[in-house]
Image (spheres, helix red, strand yellow):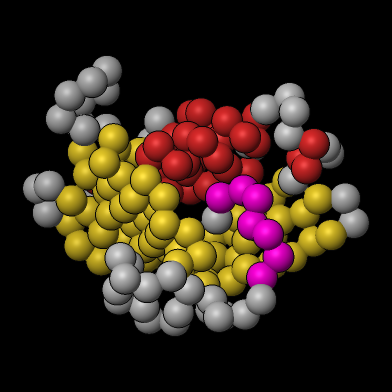
Amino acid sequence: MSTDQQDIIHFIYAEAALIDAQKFTEWLDLYTEDALYWMPLEFDQTEEHLTTSLMYEDKLLLTVRINRLQGHRTYSQKPRSRCHHLLQTPEILEINDDEVKTKTAFHYTETRNDEQFTLVGWVEHTLKRASDGEKPGALKILRKRVNLLNPEAAHSNIQLFV
């Protein structure tokens, strides 16, 4: 495995670790300005604009969610939700000059008070290297698609980020 592939795998593990540690500002910094976070409502859903999704958020909406989670008046988060990601080794599907595509199977558990639920599926990342900013060449998330094994099921409210 090349160093570049190891960096990509480490990046995906580090992203999940930031969510689990609730370091949401640092997590959001991993995203490009034109990033998209998508969780389809249907298995193998291909249409994202004309079909309902569980989540379809750009960086602005992700920022709003983070501000809500960190707000002092967010009483629905007292006590705060917690989560844990269990990831299979990411599979690198494609590497080219501009983008990297990966697929990672996961088990995600979220808990708050006495309630706990688990989601299972795989995440498809589209990563790109930053061309400017403070860390040129650093990996950034352009697109994150969270595919649930059972997206059509009635799910609990997902408070955090899968």
Q: Quadrant of residue 135?
A: top left
Identified at 71% across, 65% down, the residue is 156
Q: Is 152 included in the stretch rendered in magenta?
A: no
> Residue 154: x percent and y percent?
66, 76
In the image, 11 versus 23, the foreground residue is: 23
Q: Is residue 95 left or right of residue 50?
A: left
Residue 157 vertical position relative to residue 142 in the rendered view, above or below: below
Residue 134 vertical position relative to residue 32 in the rendered view, above or below: above
Dominant secondary structure of the residues highlighted in magenta in the image: loop
Range of residues picked out in magenta: 155-161
Q: Is 159 included in the stretch rendered in magenta?
A: yes
Identified at 77% across, 54% down, the residue is 111
Q: Is residue 30 left or right of residue 138?
A: right
Residue 136 vertical position relative to residue 38 in the rendered view, above or below: above
Classify the position of the N terminus by image quarter. bottom left
Identified at 12% across, 54% down, the residue is 96
